Amino acid sequence: MSKGVKRTSRLPSLRLPTKCPKSSIKQYSIIESMSRTIYGTHNSCTYGPLLNQCLFVVTPWVRNQTLSITDQLEKGVRWFDFRVSIENGTIYLSHTYLMEHTLKDILDEMVEYLKNKPDCPFLLIHLRVDSHALANQALIEPLVRDILSSYASLCIEKDGFDTSIPLLQNNTKGKILFYNSNATLSHPSIFSSDLMPSVYGWDTGSMDAFDERLLQMDAFYAAQTQPFLYPNERMIIFDYSSNAPLWYTDRQQVQLMQKHKARLLDKHLTIMAGNEIEDWLTIFGA
C-alpha cells in the first residue's frame, strides 16, 4: 500500500517460510556496515499503534516494520523512508493512516542515538508528504521546515556536501542527509532530487511481475534518466504490496530475496531496503 493498492487476480501460491525468531538475528554495530551495502527500511515508522487506535483493523495493510527506529539503527539500518501527514497542526509519520509517532519525536530519537554513537556514519532519510496527505501539502511543508530548522546542527547542508565521493566511501559521521524525490517538501537541508536509480516492486501488480523485473534489473536501472544525487550507484527496494495483508506479501518477498540472492550480491548494490527487516537481514549475512 505504499503508493496505492495494486490488485492481482490471484496471489502466487508460494510456501510461507517460518518467521525468524528475534534471537536468531545477528546484532551488529552500524559502524560495521560502513563499508558494505547499506540496509534500509521501507515505511520505516510504521511500527507501533495508529494515532486513531479505533482503526486497528487496517494495521495488517499499514505496518511494514515492527522494530523501533533505535532498534533499526542497532541492526545497522542507515537508509530510512519517512512519509508525513498532519493532524491538528502536528506532523506525524504515516502510511495512508497516521501513526502515533510525530516527526519531532522520531528525530529526537535519532539525535539521542547519534549523540551516544558519535562515530556513526551519516544516515539517509527519504522525507516526503504521504500520497494520501497531498491535499494538505501547503500546511505540512512550513511545519516540516520549522522542525528541520530546529535540528540544523544535525542536517547535512546541500552546499557543503560532495556527492562525487561514492556513498560508501564518504566518511561523514553523526549527521543526516534528507532528500525529497517528488517536490512535496523544500528546505535548505533537503536535497531536491532522488538518490540513485532504483528497482522497486510497488507498481508491478503481481509477485511474478516483480520477479521478472529483478531478472531485468539492469535494463530497469538504465531506463531511469531523472536527476540523481548518485547516478552511478544502485538501490533496490522490496516494497511490493497487493490487496493481501502485508505480512503475507512480505514473506513472499523474502522468498524472492532468497531466489535472487546470488545476483543481488553480485550487483554490489549501494542500498538494499525492504519491509520487516528482521526477516531478511540474515539472508545476506548481516
Image (tube, rainbow, N blue to C red):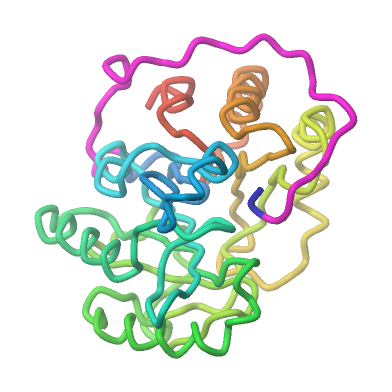
Residue found at x 77% / y 60%: 224
Looking at the image, which is closer to me, 166 or 214? 214
Looking at the image, which is closer to me, 202 or 9? 9
Q: Is residue 182 magenta?
A: no
Hey, which residue is sitting farthest right in the picture? Answer: 9
Would residue 191 be found to the left or right of residue 248 on screen? left
In percent of width and height, residue 283 lies at 48, 20
Hey, which residue is sitting farthest left in the picture? Answer: 116
Vertically, is 210 above or below 62?
A: above
Q: Is residue 28 magenta?
A: yes
Looking at the image, which is closer to me, 255 or 1? 1
Residue found at x 39% / y 77%: 161
In this figure, what is the number of numbered marks? 0
Q: Main secondary structure of the magenta part?
A: loop
In percent of width and height, residue 26 lies at 29, 22
In percent of width and height, residue 24 lies at 31, 14
Considering the image in quadrants, where does the C terminus appear? top left
Vertically, is 155 above or below 231?
A: below
Q: Quadrant of residue 16?
A: top right
Hey, which residue is sitting farthest front in the picture? Answer: 54
Q: For the magenta stretch, what is the residue range?
A: 3-32
Vertically, is 114 above or below 49?
A: below
Would residue 43 be found to the left or right of residue 226 on screen? left
In percent of width and height, residue 266 lies at 60, 29
Would residue 256 be found to the left or right of residue 129 on screen? right
Residue found at x 72% / y 42%: 201
Residue found at x 61% / y 50%: 234
Q: Quadrant of residue 259?
A: top right
